[in-house]
Image (spheres, rainbow, N blue to C red):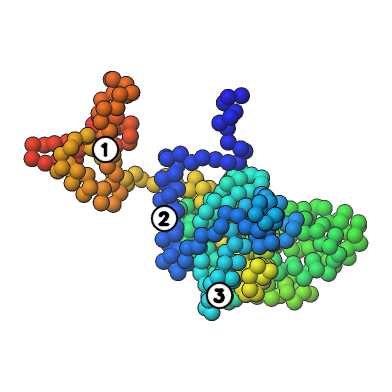
Amino acid sequence: MGEERWMLPAGVIEILPSEAQPLENLRRRLLDTYKSWGYELLITPLIEYLDTLLVKPGDTLDLQTFKLIDQLTGRMMGVRADMTPQVARIEARQLQKPVPTRLCYLDTVLHTRPSKFAGLRTPIQLGAELYGYQGIAGDVEIIQLMIETMQQAGIRDYQIDIGHLGVYQEFLNQFTPEVQNCLLDIIKRRAAAELPDLVKTHRITATHQTWLENLLNLSGDQSILIEAQDNLIGYQKTTQALKELTLLAEQLQNIPIHFDLAEYRGYQYHTGLTYGIYVPNHGRALIKGGRYDLGLQHIGRPQPATGFSTNLTLLAALAPPSPLKQRKIFAPANPDPQLSQEIARLRSEPDTTVICELPEISDLPPQLTKTEQAQIMGCQYELQWKGKCWEIVAIST
């Protein structure tokens, strides 16, 4: 029982120094990269009233949100499970720029249940959003920034998947909500084998069945967009969605893209183009995003919007180990002013750490030498007095 007191809840992790430093290094690189693209950093509140935090009751985001009662007002509040609605609210209520707005964010979110991808309930969400621009160039920029995120993480083996909810939106809208949910479930699971039973139960026409079968089979390179124009006919929104996908493909000629017209990912606020980056041996998108024009208008102002998010913890875990660049130097406990000046000088140099010995540590094992202390602390060098000055000397292993 005593040991169980120190156990963390399922899906909650602690990050030790050996993992925290690479994660912090990646965080800094990515935020600096986003800044160089014009994306300004935003910090959102940990909790908000549910009225502004959620998209609609009962959706995926609602089910993932921890809820509590505000003792000051009696209103229901939630701990953020996704920062995108918060960013949209802040942009609409606080910034309101007359030009396209680029924002980025990074902080911990909390989920009621562990994700199926990483098994975490406390992912560190990193993302970027572009507001106020409807053209396809905005989607191109977001996809390019997703790719740059993978490059900065050092992950080279990945696949970019692009879909469009508008491909089948108008098709679904012609059915009752009950049938829509059944059809959407089949689309999500690619369960084409269940279509005949659904057709019998809900009296769906053979034409509708063929249309949906065609949709489930349309995935691949840019050539499937031409095939889709011949097989997914009869709906204006479908035609428009295919035009947008074709235009996107033309502007991303040098980037290998996998198009999946039956793709369904993200939260319910997405309304159009969707993007995802997948890595081997993981069934869920490492980075996901898409367009949500008017998808969050209840908490913001009606305007076009697109963006992406990822879990920084998982991104860092999948990144290859980077070569050790940090130089750690052990400095002896010595009141010499010249030593203090040298320590200050070394600490001002990039990628240099100086750890000072603490004098008269009584509880160290007596057989532990100063050099061994330095090695345990990860120091590769130590400062030694060489008659005229303090010099950096490599610690022999």
State how far apart marks 2 and 3 are (Cα). Answer: 28 Å
Q: Element under label 3?
A: loop
Q: Nearer the viewer, mark 2 or mark 3?
A: 3
Residue placed under numbered mark 1 in the picture: 356
Q: Residue at x 36, y 45 (%)?
A: 323
Q: Is residue 171 left or right of residue 143?
A: right
Residue 387 position (above or below residue 195)? above
Residue placed under numbered mark 3 in the picture: 96
Q: Residue at x 62, y 62 (%)?
A: 85
Residue 110, image x and y in percent? 60, 49
Question: In the image shown, does 180 or 229 lie closer to the viewer?
Answer: 180
Residue 56, image x and y in percent? 73, 61
Residue 232, image x and y in percent? 75, 70
State how far apart marks 1 and 2 are (Cα). Answer: 26 Å
The type of residue carrying mark 1 is: Cys
Residue 200 position (above or below residue 113)? below
Question: In the image shown, does 206 or 191 lie closer to the viewer?
Answer: 191
Would you identify the image quadrant in which residue 47 lies? bottom right
The type of residue carrying mark 2 is: Arg
Question: In the image shown, does 58 or 291 lie closer to the viewer?
Answer: 58
Q: Is residue 162 visible?
A: no
Q: Quadrant of the C terminus?
A: top left
Q: Element under label 1?
A: strand
Residue placed under numbered mark 2 in the picture: 28
User: Which residue is the extreme one toward the left?
Assistant: 388
Q: Residue at x 62, y 38 (%)?
A: 10
User: Which residue is the extreme one toward the bottom?
Assistant: 98
Q: Quadrant of the N terminus?
A: top right
Q: Residue at x 62, y 52 (%)?
A: 79
User: Which residue is the extreme one toward the top?
Assistant: 366
Q: Is residue 52 left or right of residue 320?
A: right
Number of residues whose C-alpha sits closer than 10 Å to that of mark 1, classed few (under 14), some (14–19) or many (20 or more): some
